[in-house]
């Protein structure tokens, strides 16, 4: 009889509590606009996230040292070349990629114009990854003649763009063999799978996405120099924009390139970060700025002839006024060590002065090539030979490609079945705890997770203080100083009577301003809530001329990992909250795939900071990024180099055990992907949860 009464009492109590929570939720929902307004209140000074990320990046860019002798310089340059190739270009790639026998298929020849013809071909950058090309062949070939490789920029017309055709035609009429190559994402390769922001899918798998870019150039040189009449002592490379970037990369690292003319394609990392010239994924590859800046690559051209061309009013990027001089200052001493100062030249274009490789810039290229490949030859024509009537349509220049041509996305898909490398979890508790310790250290190293402390600043006028929240709520702004580098804004809310309420840190991909409904839910459940915006999200979103997703790439280029920084910021605030509230448990609720991953990493690597996790909208596997063909533009920090090679979501979640972990609103895939966690949590006497 007593048992029934107790049961009825418990049921009544739960009903009363549920009704109270429902009424509280309704009351908060009725005032959702006011709650959203409180969460949207700006905490940081305008432009603070951009200033902080620039200040963080700049000192981490490797400096160009000074050298007093040629021997010292050559030793350093050789080391940079080795390190760039091994630690950046081919990092993590299978030897089969680098050593593969690349196929070449020579196709039909079409009429060019007076003095030359055009032969079509395709070649492999990697097995199955075919690139279209055109060989401009002079009619009169005797002995050895110069070879020029013309690489594309970001012109959607690709190899058919007019200014590139005219450059190729003009050199062919001067007796030069010319390779006109297609570039990933342009012309015939203008497909989603070759989008430059999909190269990061390879990075995620631990295989350098930069490798195909480099191999495409290196293997084109191989096939060009294998031509019967190609002179290995006279090899030129030129290109605009992304073609300028390609030019400095291949000509800085491959000693076979004897003359280079990059046009408006790159700047030093220091000027890039100051003037928002960040470039695409391939221009800021992981860890490159730790090994070498583009100043180093420019200097590594010494003593080979190098013409740097920039545009005075460039309407795209790398404007001459701020880009050119730092490159010259870095390279001049190296050329001087060889007594070859005159081999380093520059040209600033004023007509039209925009982002171009038009006639004036082309004529500078012809003249430069004439000086070094045809010295003393008065018959060499330095002015452009009018050839507009010989331009071909894109259709006329089309090169047949296999229907199953391999692109970045398809290549990443082939890597997935064997990832992560060690997917199995231990099956007994002692082995599980040892595994956690070892894997935790590996994850910290992989993501370069800093060990930050957080300090709350509440006395700065305009950046912290009480807010009017209404409905019996107390609200205040908080500014957290994270280590010596970062400022994280936050808003804390609680019922005025709930001074000892459990504490939840709330974070979301869209920022705290978009989390009013989650705050209402947590407050209705009796929680005290601190809603924060770590680096890159919400109020901490970086606002600059370049898209904000490029800054995470730049952080990786200087040796850091944005996901590791975000996780460390979150863990630091959790530790502060735990100490501030008398060591109460601190739970984290994360909304969205980016914040969920940061929260999961924080719980995995800082086991004493976070007492439990609730994730809404989380990935259940990093393989979803490739299965769903995601790009770095939308989820930049998740493409950390090599993360999926060693860890998937299951392994990260296993590191968080035995703390409570809830995945909200899982789909069928999540139930399959996360199934191993049931047995894993049982080892620790806990339960893993998938919540509707």
Image (cartoon, rainbow, N blue to C red):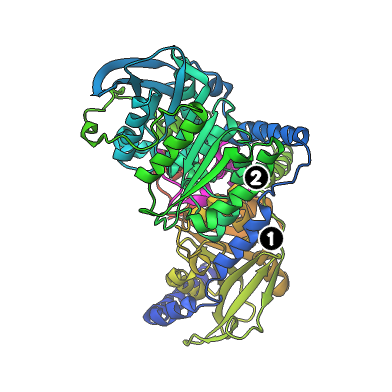
Q: Percent from the top left, x then y, of residue 22?
A: 42, 75
> Which comes before the other along the chain, label 2 or label 1?
2
User: Would you say residue 646 sits in the magenta stretch?
Assistant: yes
Q: Residue at x 39, y 40 (%)?
A: 362
Q: Percent from the top left, x then y, of residue 381?
A: 38, 32
Along the line of sight, which residue is nearer the eye, 685 or 312?
Answer: 312
Residue holding disc 2: 332
Q: Residue at x 69, y 55 (%)?
A: 450
Q: Residues within 10 Å of mark 1 (few under 14, many from 20)?
A: many
Q: Residue at x 54, y 20 (%)?
A: 96
Write the start and end of the magenta stretch as one range: 627-656
C-alpha distance separating marks 2 and 1 = 52 Å
Along the line of sight, which residue is nearer the eye, 405 or 593?
Answer: 405
Residue 391, can we see it? yes
In this rendering, would 68 be left or right of 308?
Answer: right
Along the line of sight, which residue is nearer the eye, 20 or 148?
Answer: 148
Callout 1: SS: loop
Residue holding disc 1: 609
260 vs 574: above or below: above
In this rendering, the count of numbered labels is: 2
Residue 623, can we see it? no
329 vs 518: above or below: above
Q: Percent from the top left, x then y, of residue 63?
A: 69, 49
Q: Residue at x 48, y 72 (%)?
A: 519
Q: Percent from the top left, x then y, of residue 325?
A: 58, 53
State the quadrant of the C terminus.
bottom left
Along the line of sight, which residue is nearer the eye, 671 or 542?
Answer: 542
Callout 2: SS: helix
């Amino acid at each position: 009889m007593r048992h029934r009464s107790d049961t009825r009492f418990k049921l009544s109590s739960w009903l009363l509590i549920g009704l109270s929570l429902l009424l509280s939720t309704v009351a908060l929902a009725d005032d959702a606009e006011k709650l959203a307004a409180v969460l949207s209140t700006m905490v940081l000074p305008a432009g603070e996230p951009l200033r902080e990320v620039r200040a963080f990046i700049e000192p981490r860019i490797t400096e160009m040292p000074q050298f007093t002798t040629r021997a010292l310089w050559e030793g350093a340059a050789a080391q940079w070349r080795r390190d760039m190739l091994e630690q950046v270009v081919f990092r993590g790639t299978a030897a089969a990629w680098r050593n593969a026998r690349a196929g070449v298929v020579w196709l039909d020849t079409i009429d060019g114009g007076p003095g030359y013809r055009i032969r079509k071909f395709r070649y492999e950058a990697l097995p199955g990854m075919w690139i279209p090309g055109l060989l401009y062949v002079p009619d009169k070939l005797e002995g050895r003649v110069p070879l020029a490789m013309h690489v594309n920029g970001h012109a959607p017309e690709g190899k058919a763009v007019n200014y590139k055709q005219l450059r190729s035609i003009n050199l062919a009429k001067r007796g030069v063999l010319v390779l006109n190559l297609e570039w990933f994402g342009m012309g015939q390769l203008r497909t989603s799978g070759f989008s430059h922001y999909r190269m990061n899918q390879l990075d995620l798998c631990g295989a350098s996405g930069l490798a195909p870019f480099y191999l495409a150039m290196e293997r084109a040189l191989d096939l060009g120099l294998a031509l019967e009449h190609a002179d290995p002592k006279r090899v030129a490379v030129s290109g605009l924009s992304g073609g300028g970037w390609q030019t400095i990369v291949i000509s800085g690292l491959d000693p076979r390139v004897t003359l280079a003319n990059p046009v408006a394609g790159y700047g030093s990392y220091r000027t890039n970060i100051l003037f928002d010239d960040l470039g695409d994924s391939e221009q800021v590859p992981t860890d490159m700025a730790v090994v070498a800046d583009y100043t180093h690559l420019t200097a590594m051209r010494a003593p080979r002839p190098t013409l740097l061309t920039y545009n005075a009013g460039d309407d795209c990027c790398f404007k001459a006024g701020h880009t050119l001089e730092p490159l010259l200052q870095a390279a001049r001493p190296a050329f001087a060590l060889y007594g070859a100062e005159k081999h380093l030249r520059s040209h600033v274009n004023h007509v039209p002065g925009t982002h171009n490789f038009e006639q004036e810039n082309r004529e500078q290229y012809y003249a430069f090539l004439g000086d070094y490949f045809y010295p003393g030859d008065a018959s060499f024509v330095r002015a452009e030979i009018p050839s507009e009537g010989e331009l071909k349509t894109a259709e006329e220049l089309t090169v047949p490609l296999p229907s199953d041509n391999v692109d970045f996305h398809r290549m990443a898909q082939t890597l997935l079945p064997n990832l992560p490398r060690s997917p199995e979890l231990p099956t007994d508790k002692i082995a599980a705890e040892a595994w956690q310790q070892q894997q935790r250290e590996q994850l910290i190293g992989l993501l370069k997770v800093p060990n930050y402390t957080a300090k709350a600043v509440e006395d700065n006028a305009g950046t912290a203080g009480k807010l009017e929240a209404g409905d019996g709520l107390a609200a205040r702004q908080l500014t957290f100083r994270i280590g010596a580098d970062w400022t994280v804004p936050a808003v804390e809310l609680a019922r005025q009577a709930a001074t000892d309420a459990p504490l939840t840190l709330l974070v979301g991909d869209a920022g705290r301003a978009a989390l009013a409904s989650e705050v209402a839910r947590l407050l209705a459940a009796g929680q005290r809530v601190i809603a924060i915006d770590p680096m890159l999200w919400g109020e901490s979103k970086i606002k600059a001329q370049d898209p904000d997703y490029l800054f995470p790439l730049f952080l990786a280029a200087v040796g850091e990992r944005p996901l590791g920084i975000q996780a460390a910021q979150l863990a630091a605030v959790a530790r502060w909250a735990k100490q501030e509230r008398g060591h109460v448990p601190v739970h984290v609720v994360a909304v969205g795939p980016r914040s969920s991953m940061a929260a999961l990493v924080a719980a995995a690597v800082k086991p004493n900071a976070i007492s439990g996790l609730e994730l809404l909208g989380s990935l259940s596997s990093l393989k979803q990024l490739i299965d769903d063909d995601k790009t770095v533009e939308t989820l930049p920090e998740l493409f950390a180099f090599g993360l999926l090679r060693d860890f998937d979501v299951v392994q990260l979640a296993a590191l968080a055990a035995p703390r409570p972990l809830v995945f909200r609103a899982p789909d069928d895939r999540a139930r399959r992907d996360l199934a191993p966690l049931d047995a894993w949590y049982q080892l620790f006497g806990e339960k893993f949860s998938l919540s509707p």
